[in-house]
C-alpha cells in the first residue's frame, strides 16, 4: 500500500526560548512554523496534499492558511507505493533549511544591515541551525494504521536521540552571543564603544549586545517588529482605566512632551491589533515608567532626565485627581498551554482519513481561533501549533483568556472525537505565570512551563491533567503556585476573580492570607489532624471584620487536603489580579454574575 513518513524539525524549545525580547520569541516561533510549512509544501508537491495527514490541507495553497494558524514541528504523511520515503524525508528537511537560509540572505544583505554582518559566518550558522530528522515504516493496509503509527513515532524518537555531530564550519574569534552563549557574534561594529552602540541602536539592538546569525534572523524578522512587549502587557490595565475615565488625552499629551525630550529614540512603529487606538503604536511605552527613562540616551543631557520625570509626576497627580490608579502596574501574564492525552486519543483513530479529519479540526477549529481569543483579551499570541499555545496577556483579562482557550479546546475535541470510544476527549492544561515586566524573559518562560507541567502532572494524590496552574513570581517575596482542575466547583479562575473582587471592595483584610499561611505551615510541621486545622482556620476567619456571608463563603473553600494552605496562597495570588482589575476600572461583579463565569 505504501509507507508512513514522519518528519521532525527542531530544536523547538531552545530555538524559541533563546530570546531577550518578546519579538525574538515571536520571531523564533514563526520561523519554525514557516520552516515546517516549507517542508510540508515539499511533501505536498511530491505526493499530493491529500496524502498529508498532519497538517491536512485540501490543497497546496491552503497550507498558507494553515501556516497562519501555526504548523507544528512534526509532520506526518502517507507515501504511496513506488515513491521513496527516505528521499522525500530528506527533501522536506532540506526545504525547511533552505527556507531559513533564503530569508537570512534577504535580511543580512539588505542595504541597512549588510555592512555590519559577517555574511559567511552568519549564513553558515543559520544553515546549521535546524535539526531535521525523519523516519518511515511500511503500511500494509488502513487497518494496520494505529500500530504502524505507534511504531513510526517510537522510531522517530529513537532517531532524534541519535544526534548528528558535524564539525563547526562557522567558528571564529569573536564575542559569544549575548542570548545563548553558544554561537559567536557575527556583528561587524566600530571599535569605539559609543559609535558601536549608535550602530546597534540603528540596527534595533541594545547597548553592548552581541548577536549570532540566528539571533539576527529573529531580531530582524519583518513581522516581529509589530509584536507587543512585556511592558505593553503591563501598561494595558492602566490604559483601560484611563480610557474608562476619559483621561486618554492627558496620557497622550504627556507622551508627546516626553517624546520631544527623548527625540527620535522614543518614536516606534508597533502595528499590533491590541495596540490599535492606543498611543503605544507610535510612542515607546517605556516612557511611562520613571525607572526606564535612563534607557534613552537623549535624556542624558543636563536637566533632561529630571524634566522627563517631572512630566510623569505631574501626569500621575492629574490622573489621581480623576480617580485613576497611577502610575502603571509592573506585572503581566505569560500563558503556556498544551493538550492532554493527545497520543492516547490518536491511537483510537483507526485509519489515516480519520487522523486527517482530526488534524483539520484541530487546525481550523482550535489553532486558527487561538489568535482571535488571545487578542480579544488584549494579549499577543507568540506561538500556536496544533494543541500548543504560548501567549502574553495583561493581568486584568488573563484568567478569562485561559478559561476561554480551555473551553474552545474542549468543544473542538469533543466534536472531533464524537463516536470514538474514549473515556474522555483530550483536554487542555494551562500554565499561567504572573511575572514583572522587567524580569528576564527566559525566567518568565521557565516559570510558565513549570506551571504548565504542574497543571498537567499535579501534586501527589491529585488527579492529573485538565487543569490550570497559576504561578506568581513577585519581585520581593516567595514564588507561589496554585493548581485547580477545570472541572472543579468553583474553578480556580472563579475563585481568584471572586477573591480579587473581595480584596478590591475591602471585604477581606490583607492579614487573613498570612495568618492562614502560617497556620498551614504549622499544621504541616506539627502534623495536626485535618479537623483541628480546619477548626482553627474557621476561627481565624470568624474573628475578622468581614460580612458573615463572606466568612461562610471562604469557609466553604477550606475543604480538601490542602484547603487551608491553598486558600492562603489564592488570597496572596489574587492580589496582583485585584490591582490590575482596579487599575483597569473593571466592574466588581455580584455573586450571581461570578457564578455564571
Image: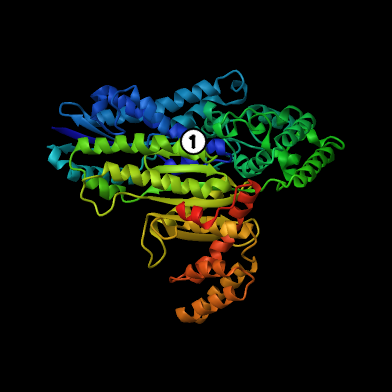
Total numbered labels placed on residues in the image: 1
Q: Which residue reaches farthest right? A: 302
Q: Secondary structure at mark 1?
A: helix
Tell me which residue sits at (27%, 26%) in the image: 49
Q: Position of residue 55 (x, y in %)?
A: 31, 33
In the foreground, 101 or 356 = 356
Image point (41%, 33%), residue name: 69
**Residue 100 rendering spot, x and y as whole percentages:** 44, 28
- In the picture, measured across the screen, residue 241 lies left or right of residue 416, that is right
Callout 1 environment at 10 Å: few (<14), some (14 to 19), or many (20+)? many
**Quarter of the figure with residue 478:** bottom right
Left or right placement of residue 230 versus residue 555 in this view: right
In the image, 448 versus 410, the foreground residue is 410
Residue 513: which quarter of the image?
A: bottom right
> Which is more toward the observer, 293 or 62?
62
Colouring chosen for the image of the structure: rainbow
Residue most extreme to the top: 111
- Can residue 214 be seen here? yes
Q: Quadrant of the N terminus?
A: top left
Residue 190 can be seen, yes or no? no
Compared to residue 448, the image places residue 198 above or below, namely above
Report the residue at 60% width, 72% height from top. Answer: 515
List x then y, in percent, for residue 128.
44, 33
Q: Quadrant of residue 465?
A: bottom left
| Residue named by callout 1 | 28
Position of 39 with respect to 567 (left or right) is left
Q: Could you say where residue 261 lies in the image, as x and y percent from the top left?
A: 80, 31
Q: Is residue 33 left or right of residue 60?
A: right
Closer to the camera in the image, 211 or 259: 259
Amino acid at each position: 500500500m505504501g509507507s508512513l513518513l514522519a518528519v521532525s524539525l527542531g530544536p523547538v524549545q531552545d530555538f524559541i526560548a533563546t530570546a531577550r525580547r518578546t519579538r525574538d520569541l515571536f520571531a523564533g516561533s514563526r520561523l519554525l512554523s514557516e520552516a515546517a510549512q516549507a517542508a510540508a509544501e515539499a511533501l505536498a508537491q511530491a505526493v499530493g496534499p491529500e496524502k498529508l495527514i498532519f497538517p491536512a490541507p485540501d490543497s497546496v495553497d491552503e497550507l498558507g492558511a494553515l501556516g497562519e494558524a501555526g504548523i507544528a514541528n512534526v509532520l506526518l504523511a502517507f507515501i504511496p507505493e513506488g515513491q521513496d520515503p527516505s528521499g522525500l524525508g530528506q527533501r522536506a528537511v532540506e526545504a525547511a533549511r533552505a527556507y531559513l537560509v533564503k530569508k537570512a540572505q534577504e535580511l543580512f544583505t539588505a542595504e541597512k544591515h549588510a555592512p555590519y554582518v559577517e555574511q559567511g559566518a552568519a549564513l553558515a550558522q543559520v544553515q546549521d541551525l535546524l535539526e531535521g530528522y525523519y523516519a518511515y515504516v511500511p503500511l500494509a493496509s488502513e487497518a494496520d494504521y494505529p500500530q504502524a503509527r505507534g511504531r513510526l513515532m517510537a522510531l522517530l524518537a529513537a532517531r532524534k536521540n541519535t544526534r548528528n555531530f558535524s564539525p563547526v564550519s562557522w567558528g571564529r574569534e569573536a564575542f559569544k552571543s549575548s542570548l545563548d552563549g553558544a554561537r559567536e557574534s557575527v556583528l561587524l561594529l566600530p571599535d569605539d564603544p559609543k559609535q558601536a552602540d549608535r550602530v546597534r541602536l540603528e540596527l534595533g539592538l541594545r547597548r553592548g549586545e552581541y548577536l549570532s546569525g540566528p539571533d539576527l534572523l529573529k531580531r530582524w524578522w519583518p513581522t516581529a517588529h509589530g509584536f507587543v512587549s512585556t511592558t505593553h502587557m503591563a501598561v494595558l490595565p492602566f490604559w483601560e482605566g484611563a480610557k474608562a475615565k476619559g483621561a486618554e488625552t492627558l496620557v497622550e499629551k504627556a507622551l508627546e512632551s516626553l517624546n520631544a525630550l527623548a527625540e527620535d529614540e522614543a518614536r516606534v512603529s508597533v502595528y499590533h491589533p491590541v495596540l490599535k487606538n492606543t498611543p503605544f503604536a507610535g510612542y515607546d511605552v517605556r516612557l511611562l515608567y520613571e525607572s526606564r527613562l535612563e534607557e534613552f540616551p537623549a535624556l542624558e543631557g543636563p536637566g533632561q532626565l529630571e524634566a522627563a520625570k517631572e512630566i510623569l509626576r505631574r501626569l500621575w497627580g492629574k490622573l489621581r485627581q480623576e480617580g485613576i490608579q497611577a502610575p502603571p502596574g509592573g506585572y503581566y501574564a505569560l500563558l503556556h498551554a498544551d493538550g492532554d492525552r493527545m497520543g492516547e486519543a490518536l491511537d483510537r483513530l483507526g485509519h489515516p482519513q480519520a487522523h486527517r479529519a482530526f488534524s483539520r479540526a484541530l487546525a481550523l477549529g482550535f489553532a486558527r481561533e487561538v489568535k482571535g481569543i488571545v487578542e480579544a483579551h488584549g494579549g499577543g499570541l507568540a506561538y500556536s501549533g496544533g494543541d500548543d499555545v504560548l501567549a502574553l496577556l495583561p493581568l486584568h483579562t488573563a484568567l478569562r483568556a485561559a478559561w476561554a482557550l480551555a473551553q474552545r479546546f474542549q468543544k473542538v475535541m469533543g466534536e472531533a472525537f464524537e463516536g470514538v470510544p474514549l473515556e474522555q476527549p483530550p483536554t487542555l492544561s494551562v500554565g499561567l505565570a504572573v511575572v514583572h515586566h522587567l524580569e528576564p524573559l527566559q525566567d518568565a518562560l521557565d516559570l510558565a512551563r513549570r506551571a504548565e507541567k504542574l497543571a498537567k502532572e499535579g501534586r501527589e494524590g491529585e488527579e492529573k491533567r485538565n487543569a490550570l496552574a497559576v504561578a506568581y513570581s513577585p519581585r520581593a517575596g516567595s514564588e507561589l503556585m496554585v493548581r485547580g482542575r477545570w472541572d472543579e466547583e468553583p474553578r480556580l479562575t472563579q475563585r481568584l476573580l471572586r477573591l480579587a473582587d473581595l480584596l478590591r471592595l475591602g471585604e477581606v483584610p490583607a492579614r487573613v492570607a498570612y495568618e492562614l499561611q502560617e497556620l498551614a505551615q504549622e499544621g504541616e510541621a506539627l502534623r495536626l489532624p485535618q479537623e483541628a486545622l480546619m477548626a482553627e482556620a474557621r476561627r481565624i476567619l470568624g474573628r475578622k471584620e468581614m460580612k458573615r456571608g463572606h466568612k461562610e463563603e471562604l469557609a466553604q473553600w477550606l475543604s480538601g487536603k490542602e484547603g487551608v494552605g491553598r486558600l492562603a496562597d489564592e488570597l496572596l495570588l489574587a492580589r496582583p489580579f485585584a490591582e490590575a482589575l482596579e487599575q483597569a476600572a473593571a466592574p466588581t461583579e455580584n455573586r450571581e454574575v461570578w457564578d455564571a463565569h
